Amino acid sequence: MIWYTLRRLGVAALLLLVICALTFVIFYVMPDDPAQQACGKACGPERIAQIRDTLGLDRPLYHQFGSYLVGVFAGRTYGTGALSVHCGFPCLGFSFQTNEPVWRLLVTRLPVSVSIAIGAAVLWLVVGVTAGVISALRRGSLWDRAAMAAALGGISLPIYLTALLFQYVLVIKLGWLPHPHAVSLFVDPLAWVQSMIMPWTTLALLYAGLYARLARGEMVESLGRDFVRTARAKGLPERTVVLRHALRPAMTPVVTVFGMDLGALLGGALITESVYGLPGVGKLASDAINSADQPVILGVTLFAAGFIVLANVAVDLVYALLDPRVRHAT
Amino acid sequence: MRAPSTRAAPLRALLLRTRSVGTRSVLANRATTVSLVAILVLLVAALAAPVLTALAGTSPTAFDTGALDANLGGLPRGGFGGISSAHWLGVEPGSGRDLFARILYGTRVSLLIALAATAVSVVLGTVLGLVAGFFGGWADAVIGRVMDLLMSFPSLIFMIALMSVAPAANRELLLVAVLGFFGWPYAGRIVRGQAMSLSRREFVEAARALGANRRTLLFGEVLPNLAGPVLVVATLSIPACVATEAGLSFLGVGVRPPTPSWGQLIAQAVPWYAADPLYFLLPGALLFGTVLAFNVLGDAVRDALDPRGGGR
Amino acid sequence: MASRTRTASLGASLILGLIAVAGCGGAHGGAADSQAAGTHRGGTLHVLSTIDLEHLDPARAYVTSTQDVVRLVYRTLTTYAAAPGRAGSSIVPDLATDTGTPSDGAKTWTFHLKEGLKYEDGRAITAADIRYGVERTFAPELPEGPPYARTWLAGGASYQGPYKGGDLAAIATPDDRTIVFTLNRPVADFGSAAALPMFAPVPKDKDTGVGYDSRPFSSGPYKIDTFEPKKQLTLVRNESWDQKTDDVRKALPDRIEIDLNLDGSVVDQRMIAAQGEDANAVAFEPIGPASVAQVQTDPTLRARLITGESENTRFLSLNTRRGQLGNVKVRQAIAYAIDKDALRLTRGGPIAGDLATTILPPSVAGHVDGDPYPSKDGKGDPDKARQLLAEAGVAGGIDLTLDAPATNGGKAQAEAIQSSLAKVGIRVAVNEVSGSSYWSTVGNTAQEHDMVIDGWTPDWPGASTYLPIVLDGRAITKQGNNNRAQYDSSAVNSRFDQIAALPDANAANAAYGQLDGQIMADAPVVPFLWDKAAILVGPNVVGAYGHVGYVGRLDLVSLGLRG
């Protein structure tokens, strides 16, 4: 098991390294000059030269990438002399816009993204999986058809349409909810729920559709399996058959997908956060894109990729724990 | 970061062997027919955009400040987004450009990009998947690894990052390339799996025993049998591409103005959502309807072709 | 034009009056209102901002909106008067006892500090701290600040800042409360320049170099409690600040929370609803075009809308060094063709300001009325434009590239320009430049294209930091260029020198006004809008007026909350 864990982590690290390299190359080889991006409005030739020097832009690309990697794992120091700036571990550089360390920006934005992701995940898991399982049990019924039609509608909904509609109806027309703003769960729980309920529902509508379809499909297959038939033949109550024997294997793929989706959302729900104006990692990313703040874009990409890769590893490890065959097969 | 991953979602569900959802009923058939007709109408309208706007006497770029009320901040005159005989779907606040023309031209751009990107990803996926599945060995190892990498990649954030620094020239082509590149593993994986199992099937074994060469096998036996699964992937890839393109343009990294696309129209409508809700509702509803129609169609195609999924 | 703007500011004071009647039961007029309300101290004022505060460091704070905020935190030798309308553009003493004493033909400037000035930790503010603050602006590590110290102070050209170069000899501090600046040229309005943030005191032991940006040391009524860039700046009372030493800042609220980087439409909707804490809030930026209808049709909302005049002119720069734009007739054709009304409509219509016909706006002393390229309602005169193009021999049309910021507003303006020039056969391709690198890109002569969406606000009231900076041909630099028209007329350049040598500020302003007309005839730039800011304030907020020095935004130092 330890060996398996290490190997999975190794693969994950390799993947992150590749992502890191690709992102880095894209950003530093693209036509826009990073020094000019960093320079701002009152930007003279000396200033450009100085920035090039501080950021090490004159050195060969592999050298720059090396410094970046070293920074990520051990921190690095920009520039030389009295005014050099140290950027501690994990160093993702400084924002061109605000000169804040990118890592600090990410960490301060994370709670909002976590609030959105967790709440939405609970909603869509409960609604989606329940609907899917019931549909599977009552295949062909009116419920099944209605639920699956709704699910298809859900997965076709563009996030921004849902978000704008919610805001227009619930906030502007009916005045039932305030405009979402970032509040901590621990400071004002009611305001937190009021601010988060629309983003949660917006995301959950989409994902619940996906999960309902997925859960139904897996459950249908599971119900047709031999061991379920055997259990039924043994005369076990239907409840036990469904919950004990059919549900568990059907949920395995759901858990896989869930791990990946949650990982992706923790890295920031870009559109949801920008439409609702909530300052999470996703909003940070879209703002950075609008202001061409390259270190921040690079940082968010890595941060989000990290979540997704780690979520994959976590899912794999959970499997390996549950099912010994996995760790021997791979 | 893959913000609501409409892109990967349907495909992934397919890969995870989502069972069909009892869509053999008459109702479902009717839904499929309606979807098919809607898609055809949309395609024709997109192709005929110049003719239709000429009939309506409008253009997607001409300003009409006379249709706006300057003292109300440039809101269209007369409510309902300024719908009038001159502007069938109203006008854009702030500029007075005709929404009917802009949406129509937007449809052209959005559909063209989605179809082209799907074509790229399907062709790329089929070729590489075939090579991997049929020849195996190191080709399979390399292609398989690349597919794994791309599929565990945070593709949306990466696409956004890439598009945001990419040069301004020809955004449409760039979108097609980027969407196609990140989409091919979905087709590739399915083709690879099918090609692998096909190449071990009796009729291929038989053909091989009869002395057919690889080429004949590939084109004569394996490829025709892949048509079904590839068609399913392609149909489901179109709405995913439509949604992703719209998402990218919404975030401001897709097509650039004055070229309209659905995502971009909605992005421009965001500040106006309270004052002029029709401005975001019209392109939004069209986007939703299109994605839905393609999804319904995709389900239907899969039900018809998937030997295991069908009829359950 | 002048009368129209006066009506507008009259409107603003009437609105203030209305609030006063509603709140305090019978105060009269705007000024009286702020006095009456000024008695209540306390509460938390919220400021809802859609932008970031780029730099709080006094050496780097060059953005007008940031200067509005940092005036709460640190004091400068002089500052703008805290007053509505054009009275706001007068310079008054702040840390200094007066607005400076010139000698040696305005080449030496002496300031004396008031008594009892203290930092947030209670220690005295000394002249040496102001010297250190100015010296810091020379450090190449701290860029973005105004260039004036570097260009004016004797020996400034070779000085590398206090980190590498020790002290600058051109600034003397004979005692703790006297500071003397020795300049390399006469500068008649140095006392106005001393209102810039770079003339704020920085204690040497608190200087953390680049890091000072996130926590400047307070000499004003508020100190920084927390600062999360792009998210929030929280200010709390600085107990060491003494009201008796400060005639400008009222310091009424106990706490000021500035939410940054909010979405514009969200700010508008929150301000319109004004629920809960938002009743104690003000918007930092003008309302968006999409909210204008809602506000204009609701009298209670209109009463909460404060309109402020600015010194900002928006214009289209025509790069006179590129192709056909070198031909004055082509430039004049563009000046005729541009539909200014459509451009203004993209910004929300008349509420966004008046259509500009000269470079210097009416709010700047020296402005002379004029409209060399008239058209009905400012909608452009395509016939006249086509005629000029024909005379220039390009009746078949030309292709031009326009640089525009990749923001919603920038794109909309670019499309409006595209549409109005298309009518006269000028085909415009738009080059979108991401917001943050916009100014450095168009300021790079190698990267600038044919036309640039541009604008200018002077660094202090008056024309001396207006025309010479934007249109002096000798000021064209390869990078960081402000003369985006790359306009270089020897007649105009020598006129700039003559005006700079005028001893009398009024005469200089009048001369700049005349020169404005002379430049307009050459059409290197096409002015289209004199900005106004229409800003929503919460029902509990008093003392609100638009300040001409802060592009018409609210003067934050005068705001208070109802008790």
Image (cartoon, rainbow, N blue to C red):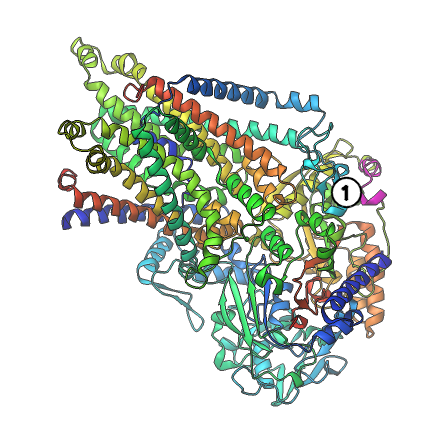
- Say which of B294 and C383 sits in front: B294
Tell me the quarter of the image containing the C terminus of chain C: bottom right
Q: Residue C327 in magenta?
A: no
A35 to B295, vertically: above or below? below
> How far across and down, in percent of the image, does residue C114 sit?
66, 87
- Judging by the rendered image, the residue that carries numbered circle 1 is C339
- Please rate how many residues cluster around mark 1, counting C-alpha atoms within 10 Å: few if below 14, some from 14 to 19, many from 20: many
Q: Residue furthest top?
A: B210
> How far across and down, in percent of the image, does residue C270 sit?
60, 55
- Say which of C37 and C138 sits in front: C37
Quadrant housing residue C129: bottom right
Quadrant housing residue A315: top left
Q: Residue C383 in magenta?
A: yes
- Examine the rendering and report whether any part of residue B11 can be seen: yes
C161 to B211, vertically: above or below? below
Q: Chain of mark 1?
A: C
Tell me the quarter of the image containing the N terminus of chain C: bottom right
- Examine the rendering and report whether any part of residue C187 can be seen: no
Numbered disc 1: secondary structure? loop
Which portion, as a residue range, is magenta? C375-389
In the displayed structure, does residue C85 sit left or right of residue C161? Answer: right
- Say which of C1 and C350 sits in front: C350
- Say which of A238 and A203 sits in front: A238
* Callout 1 amino acid: Asp
> How far across and down, in percent of the image, does residue B161 sit?
45, 45
Judged by its main secondary structure, the magenta piece is helix
